Amino acid sequence: MSGAGIARATEIANAVETFVRKVIIPYEVDPRWGSHGPTEDLVTEMRAKARAAGVLTPHILPGGSHLSQRETALVLKKSGLSPLGPLAVNTSAPDEGNMYLLGKIGSPEQKERFLKPLVEGRARSAFFMTEPWNEGGAGSDPSMLKTTARLDGNHWVINGRKRFITGAVGAKVGIIMAKSDDGACMFLVDLPDPAIIVEHVPHTIDGTMPGGHATVRIEELRVPAEQMLGKSGEGFAYAQVRLSPARLSHCMRWHGCATRANEIAINYTCRREAFGKILIDHEGVGFKLADNMIDLQQTELMIDWCADVLDSGSLGTVESSMTKVTVSETLFQVADRCVQVMGGTGVTGDTVVELIFRELRAFRIYDGPTEVHKWSLAKKIKRDFMQAHSR
């Protein structure tokens, strides 16, 4: 981590913060933000303003290189100061993770065709991984993958069903996970495609992802062989490349959201009077905000620690699991306290606090529920113990 790099990232982060606070926060009351996320029209409008302000896709530099994870943390936390911020400046999931994966694994031709429009903010993407539980499909356990890919001449033919595919409606780039005779594979596809049918977009607790989280059916989708990402059977290895940075970037963005919720709660409790004094002067309220102050600092430090691990060249699978659990659980508590100290106002749409609370509740499940991460960590604890005592 160089001083020059951090100085550059700090400058970018300051520009992103200014843009989000001045330009994007007013959009939080825009009627084009519906139950399945912001409309394409709203996303396009916000991104045009981000492009004009010079803050679109700020984590990827003009030459195509990516900020370090530690530097990215500075920027993505500021983008998260509004739930709409990551969408506006093009640091949102799943695009941010998909851009990272394509940058690492994609061929030059694939980068030109699929990565370039994502970096330029002209397209959104979807990652087709999760499958319906009632069909025994893959979820937190990717080894249960049911979607198939068979080679037919110079095309792969894909069949299966996917569930909770964020942003599938409206996306222009898709990454589909399917299994060949060699094992798991990833395929790049143009969207929409008549062979990919959206069956259902459920109502979910969150509301910031354009297109929602669709259930789709894939029927005899023909994908040219050159659109396989990497090699046949290497899909799970490529998923590991994306996994830890994607977990961590979730933590970065939602740290910004929790910070914003806390700012709103402080403003409310320092102005609202009850029982003869402002609310923050009541210990039951003031202590909750003190806990928030502590938790926001602790989670920031854990994000930075994990970022340093990834920047060292490690996959950081264990560290990112630890960080994802701690940050998601802790930031949810931060948001919960914000709702509580704001009383009735906290559960209404009068402020964005209520939405941030719902988003952070969902975060405890995204990229693996807390329980799956803890189970994985417990297996490591056991494995390390057995190895240490088998000598």
Image (tube, helix red, strand yellow):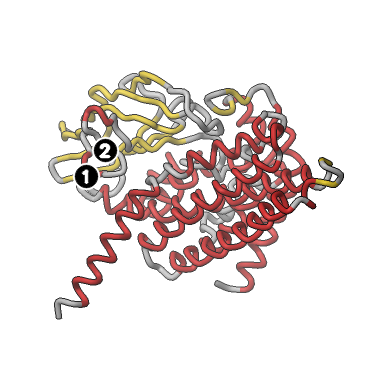
Q: CA distance from mark 2 to mark 1?
A: 7 Å
- Asked if one can make out residue 65 in the rendered structure from this viewpoint, the answer is yes
Question: Of helix, strand and loop, which one carries label 2?
Answer: loop
Q: Residue at x 49, y 63 (%)?
A: 307
Q: Which mark is residue 76?
A: none
Q: Would residue 315 appear left or right of 54 to someone viewing this image?
A: left
Q: Which residue is mark 1?
A: 143
Image point (24%, 37%), residue name:
178
Q: Where is residue 193 drawn, in percent x and y? A: 36, 23
Relative to 162, say whether 70 is above or below.
below
Name the element at disc 1.
helix
Name which residue type carries label 1: Ser
Binning the other alpha carbons within 10 Å of mark 1 as few (below 14), some (14 to 19) or many (20 upward) gives few
Labels 2 & 1 near each other (Cβ < 8 A): yes
Q: Is residue 112 visible?
A: no
Label located before the other in sequence (2 or 1): 2
Q: Amino acid at mark 2?
A: Ala
Left or right: 191, with 219 as reference point: right
112 or 204: nearer the viewer:
204
Residue extending farthest to the bottom is 391
Q: Quadrant of residue 28?
A: top right
**What number is the disc on residue 138?**
2
93 or 374: which is nearer to us? Answer: 374
| Outermost front residue | 275
- The residue positioned 45% from the left and 25% from the top of the image is 169
Left or right relative to 205: residue 239: left
Above or below residue 262? Residue 1 is: below
Residue 123 in percent (x, y) is at: 51, 34
Q: Position of residue 378 (x, y in %)?
A: 30, 60
Camera-nearest residue between 246 and 284: 284
